[in-house]
Amino acid sequence: MMEIAPFLEIKPGVTALIGGGGKTSLLYALGRELRGRGRVILCTSTHIRRPGHVPVILSGGERKLEEALARHGVVCAGTEAGDGKLTAPEPSFTRLARLADYVLVEADGSRGLPLKAHAPHEPVIPDNAGNVVLVVGADGFGHSVSAVCHRPERWAALARCSMDEPVTPALSARVLLAEALGSRVYINKVESAALMAAAEELSSYLTCHVTAGSLHEGVFRCLC
């Protein structure tokens, strides 16, 4: 299994994950990888389901977080939001960055859909984020905008297409370029030669760093 952190150039500090479906899986994959390189805090600036496999620190101030990090290496920090979900932790992201080597923030929501267009108030990227990774789900290619896009009306407007049209790499590129969010793009669920070809086409329209691959299979490729 390959590690994805080097492909995304995850460095110490705050990294925000935005975009379509796959952000939470990426969050936990990075947490597992980075644990061996330093202390890691996983959190959200919006909402995330409470994890069952990572220690969760809800209160007790910074000292409790420091103790949990010393004991476990990686923790999830947050505030109860009801329905089994967490929202942003009490300490600021600036304070969190002083407690841990890596702070990974899920800074967006997409209702599990592969692709997303953003409302004016989205994403909620911490001011001190040094790296913003935008996730695109390759499993959305070939399906109608209305079926696979969060905020489909906005996505279609940015792509200059109808909501009944199938998503293509060219249309996806229009949305990404119009929004100009993220310092790099990760195209997830690329698990066939056809999807790799689609990822390569999408990358050809972009100027930022692009990685394609599969968290499930643990295989990644830099398309740059």
Image: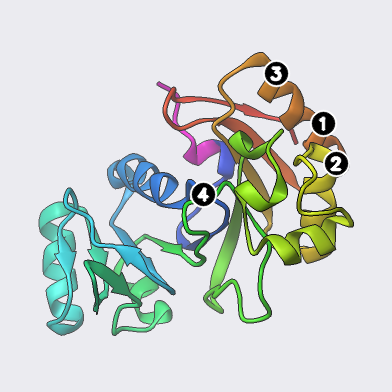
The residue under label 4 is: 21
Residue 202 in the magenta stretch? The answer is no
Q: Residue at x 72, y 44 (%)?
A: 209
- Sequence-wise, the earlier of marks 1 and 4 is 4
Taking 95 as reference, is 132 left or right?
right
- The quadrant of the image that shows the C terminus is top right
**Residue 71 rendering spot, x and y as whole percentages:** 10, 56
Is disc 3 placed on a helix, strand or loop? helix
**Residue 143 rendering spot, x and y as whole percentages:** 68, 38
The residue under label 1 is: 201
- Whole-number angstrom distance, CA of label 3 to CA of label 1: 11 Å
- Whole-number angstrom distance, CA of label 3 to CA of label 4: 20 Å
- Sequence-wise, the earlier of marks 1 and 2 is 2
Label pair 2/3, CB-CB below 8 angstroms: no
Taking 70 as reference, is 33 left or right?
right
The residue under label 3 is: 194
Label pair 1/2, CB-CB below 8 angstroms: yes
How crowded pointer 1 is (Cα within 10 Å; few <14, some 14-19, many 20+) is rated as: some
Q: Magenta part of the protein: which range?
A: 1-6
Does residue 193 lie above or below 90 as drawn? above
Q: Residue at x 77, y 65 (%)?
A: 179
Q: Amino acid at mark 4?
A: Gly
Q: Amino acid at mark 1?
A: Glu
- Taking depth in this image into account, of 80 and 10 the one nearest to the observer is 80
The residue under label 2 is: 170
- Sequence-wise, the earlier of marks 3 and 1 is 3
- Taking depth in this image into account, of 191 and 150 the one nearest to the observer is 150
